[in-house]
Image (cartoon, grey):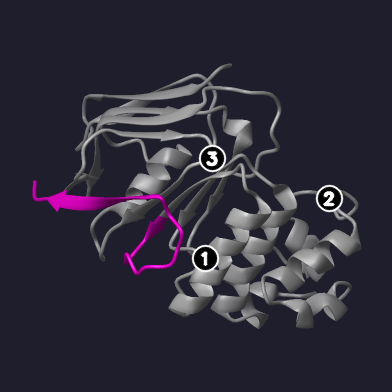
């Protein structure tokens, strides 16, 4: 499989057009295995919302490997819906999405999934606890500002309840460092942090994973994030 292509088409009895997936695609965590299409393409793309549709104001988008793209939109502009469409879990809209090989991609939602268990198991999820050694975990946690959790690796807890949202989001960035994806999609996944902290985390990923492509969906265009390109979501009524 060289790439994944989503083409939108009309489905009878559906309130919106629905896309058809050609090839293999699913959302989740992926390890890279070989080279695929070197570019992401969004062609004449519009995603359906409950009361309208959303598209990128600049038109067609082409993203090469290693680039950093910021997709900006305010509340209810459809940026999270576009994120879900790219992940293969929102099938309503028109146009075409061309993605690189899916097993080189990682999607970070606004609130990460933290399964119950030891902190070690939570950090490396969905890999097994033996897949990544403690030294790597401790280094990743320290890099994202969670060094105070290094002594908690063996403790079992409901970490989604025990950790604050900003700690949960930092933990998700630690996962990125551990998994080292080729393509990273972020949906407002640092919203609980202050601007300077978000800037530092984005900069950390760009330094630690210099060849990684990053597409970040954010609410603002404050300077200092380090993205070479910025595009904007726009919403139209039905």
Which residues fall within the magenta stretch? 217-238
Q: Nearer the viewer, residue 86 or 197?
A: 197
Q: Which quadrant is the N terminus positioned in?
A: top right
- Tell me where residue 2 appears, x and y as whole percent: 55, 17
Q: Which residue is mark 3?
A: 66
Using the image, determine if residue 195 lies above or below residue 97.
Answer: below
Q: Which residue is mark 1?
A: 111
Label 2 vs 3, first from the N-terminus: 3
> Given this view, does label 2 or label 3 mark the residue nearer the observer?
3
Q: Nearer the viewer, residue 168 or 141?
A: 141
Q: Residue furthest left?
A: 238
Classify residue 235 as left or right of residue 86. left
Classify residue 74 as left or right of residue 6. left
Task: Examine the image and state in which quarter residue 5 appears.
Answer: top left
User: Rounded to the nearest whole Å, what is the CA distance between mark 2 and mark 3?
Assistant: 29 Å
Residue at 48%, 54% (x, y): give it: 186
- Tell me where residue 67 appears, x and y as whole percent: 48, 42
């Amino acid at each position: 499989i060289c790439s994944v292509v989503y083409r939108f088409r009309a489905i009878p009895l559906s309130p919106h057009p629905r896309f058809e997936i050609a090839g293999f695609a699913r959302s989740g965590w992926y390890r890279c295995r070989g080279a695929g299409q070197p570019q992401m393409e969004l062609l004449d793309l519009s995603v359906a919302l409950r009361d309208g549709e959303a598209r990128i104001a600049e038109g067609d988008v082409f993203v090469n490997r290693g680039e950093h793209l910021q997709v900006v939109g305010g509340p209810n502009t459809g940026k999270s819906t576009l994120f879900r469409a790219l992940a293969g879990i929102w099938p309503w809209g028109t146009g075409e999405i061309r993605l690189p090989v899916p097993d080189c991609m990682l999607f970070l939602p606004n609130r990460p999934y933290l399964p119950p268990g030891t902190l070690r198991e939570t950090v490396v999820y969905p890999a097994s606890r033996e897949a990544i050694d403690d030294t790597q975990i401790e280094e990743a946690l320290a890099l994202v500002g969670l060094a105070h959790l290094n002594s908690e690796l063996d403790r079992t807890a409901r970490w989604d309840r025990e950790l604050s949202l900003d700690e949960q989001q930092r933990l998700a960035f630690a996962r990125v460092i551990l998994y080292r994806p080729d393509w990273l999609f972020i949906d407002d996944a640092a919203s609980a942090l202050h601007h300077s902290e978000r800037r530092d985390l984005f900069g950390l990923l760009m330094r630690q994973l210099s060849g990684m492509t990053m597409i970040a969906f954010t609410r603002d265009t404050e300077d200092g994030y380090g993205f070479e390109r910025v595009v904007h979501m726009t919403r139209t009524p039905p």
